[in-house]
Image (spheres, rainbow, N blue to C red):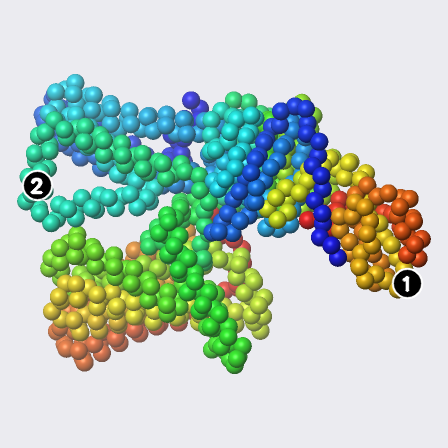
Amino acid sequence: MSMPAPLPPMSQPATAPVLRVRGLHKSFDRREVLRGIDWDVPAGRVIGLLGRNGAGKTTLLRCLLGLSPVDAGTVALFGEPMTEPGGERMHRIGFVPQTFDLFPWMKVRAYLDFTAAFYAGWNHALAARLLGDWQLDPKQKIGELSQGQRQKLAIVRAIAPGPDLLVLDEPVASLDPQARRAFMAELLELMQAPGKTVIFSTHITADLERADADITLLRDGAIRFTRPLGELRERMKRVVLARAEGWTQAPAVAGLLKATLKDREAQLLVEDPLTDSLRALAEREGASLRIEQPTLEDLFVELA
Amino acid sequence: MRAVGQLWLLSFRHAPLAAALLQLMWLAGATALASVPWTGIAAASIAAVLLGSGIWLWSMLLGMDLRGLCQPDSLLLPGFRRRLAWTGLLHLLQWVLLPTALGLLLGVPHALLAGALVLLLGAFGLASGSERYLNLLVWALFVLAGWKPGLATQAALVLAASPWAVPLALLLAALLLRLALRDLLRVEDRQIDSSPLENTQLGRSRSADGAPARRGAVGRRLLRLFDATAQRAMARALARYRARPSALRRMVLVRRLLLPHDNPQAIALRLLLVAALVSFYVVAVMHRQHFDAVMVGAYAILLGLARFPRLGQGMRRMRPNLADLYLTLAPATRADYQKTLTDALLVLVPITALTTVAYTALGIVLTHATAPWRMLLDALVVGAAASLVALAVHLIGPEGRLGRALVDIAVTLGAMVTYWGGYWLLGALGYALGGGALALVTLSFGIAVWLAAQREYQHRPPCFDAPLA
């Protein structure tokens, strides 16, 4: 078995990125979580941040917004350095944290009134509609809401100001399927407006597929790649070579990212496979050849 | 301005009664000040007292609210700091600038100095309310003053008459405000508690909104130290259980899980820390002045019982996690599981009783108490009985914040009064008779309350729901 090889970086967009990260390092008690992150996020895209549990997705998102102090490196949001959250630039940012623990004694309505007072462009109609659609009782205390209901409230809070950049940390983890679909519909509607950018971490790859997101993979504290989903689908193939005597080592194939040897099969994740070379290899090794299209979830499992 | 208004309303939403009372206090103070031309200068003193104590309490309330509000997520609100500053200016205008201006207008003597001192009190209240160690700086002043009281009085009088008094008070207030607010508005990573049932923050707890309190470098180091002892104790308990499984060793494992900081090393460390603080307080602040023996023991009881409110609160917060323990233990009946919990927590009774005795012994040494054995015996008996009662009421007592607070006050005051009664009884009837009577009355009461609570707790079905706000 071989470890996944790094993918080449995506070509840089012509427009100035909404977010630019350079050499970002972050440690907790001498345990390095982020190891020199370099990342550009162009405007007008949905970015799905993927990574295993503990890969540092939440830490990265918090560092981007200045919610967690960084050890080294720079973050620029909308072209300005981001050291601490604050200022009018925050009008353009919406954030849904993984857990929402603010003001358990406050009622939903009072909380939204409180938050709305800070935003010039707060969309009261949208907030009211989402409360109704998601069956959130404005008279209920936040502390009495379930985890999923709090998540919904956090999403309402983040979407209602109509932000240019929406950062969501596992936004759908606690949502029921109806609310998840409704949330995705809102997200896609939000993306209809020009220049809107969404970064969200999730393990539900189906949502990323629905949003046609660019996929960013975080592994071992570094961004391994950022690629449009369509490009990933087009270029990544699973090549299965099967022969009776099985395989003791992975066959050498150009563009090999990961190899798994199982019973009689060698399952190879290959970028831009050369079909003619593969056919020749199969013939030479006396093996059958099968080229499959992996799902995004398969890719995540293989590469993360 | 809407955001400033919302920020100003926060205290009224969180604690409407307290906020309304304090606003009434301001109104009364302002009225007293305005009435000076008719009622004379005495009204100005009343106004100063009302406004001074009012701003101190009001800013403590603000500090508590700010602890809940100044979470990293709030800092994402546009212009949060600027709007917070405007809100602060409104409070300043109401409590300091307007009354001072009125005082100056009416020709009240020392109006400017009084205004500066009111501001200083406000800054101190904010630092206390936001639970910064900063408020300990004030104690440092008392320590210095206590060493030479005559000199301190002289200095205070000279300072009051000096033209530097006002700028000095303003400077000190600005410094306190800056330090308190800087910590509140600083973005930092928060550490979670080791267990909801434990508290290594020496009195500092979670904010009013339930968010973990901020820990300084010393606090984080201490927590790591306590956690290291917990790890070692758990590893030892596991090794013993694996070597020879028994019901007793299984119970030790449950205790190590529920009460990670109640292993011998952690208890010794806690005693050492409290001893250091108490010694500093008695020697440096109180200058080893004479203490009544009954006061020493009562303080020891107070310190010993201080952990039970945390236990009551923690048991509720811990409910969802206890489902894991329930599945691991796989009890035959739900009552068995409840009994396992009560048996595990019962270890707090000897720990509290012995801790109370240790604190009393420390008090005896520090104050050169004349009847040490009488105090120790009294502390042991009352400490054991009081911890039984405290444990019982926190297991089955009220869930609401007010109910819990009332129960805490009743148990603590009851235990202190019992200690005083016990001390008198031991003096009047002697160790054998008095001690026997004290033990009979207090312990039988404590055991009866505990048994009743235990029975009630075992009848209740286990609850794994997260507590409501």
Image height check: is B241 above or below B369?
A: below
Label ID, residue B153: 2
Quadrant in the picture for residue B416 = bottom left
Q: Which residue shows up at 24% across the image and 44% down it?
A: B137
Expressed as whole percent of the image width and height from the top left, the position of residue B79 reads 45, 27
Dot 1: within a 10 Å radius of its alpha carbon, few (fewer than 14), some, or many (20 or more) residues? Answer: few
Quadrant in the picture for residue B167 = top left
Kind of residue at disc 2: Thr
Q: Is residue B55 visible?
A: no
Residue at mark 1: A244
Residue closest to the eye, B465 or B244: B244
Expressed as whole percent of the image width and height from the top left, the position of residue A22 reads 57, 35
Image height check: is B424 above or below A201?
A: below
Residue closest to the eye, A282 or A113: A282
Q: Which residue shows up at 51% across the image and 52% down it?
A: A31
Image height check: is B30 above or below A303?
A: above
- Are marks 2 and 1 in one subunit? no
Kind of residue at disc 1: Ala
Q: Is residue B235 visible?
A: yes
Q: Which residue shows up at 11% across the image and 32% down it?
A: B160
Chain for disc number 1: A
Instruction: Answer with left or right where residue B465 lies relative to residue B43.
Output: right
User: How far apart are the two marked residues, 2 and 1, measured between alpha carbons?
Assistant: 99 Å
| Figure quadrant of the N terminus of chain A | bottom right
Expressed as whole percent of the image width and height from the top left, the position of residue A25 reads 53, 42
Expressed as whole percent of the image width and height from the top left, the position of residue A63 reads 53, 39
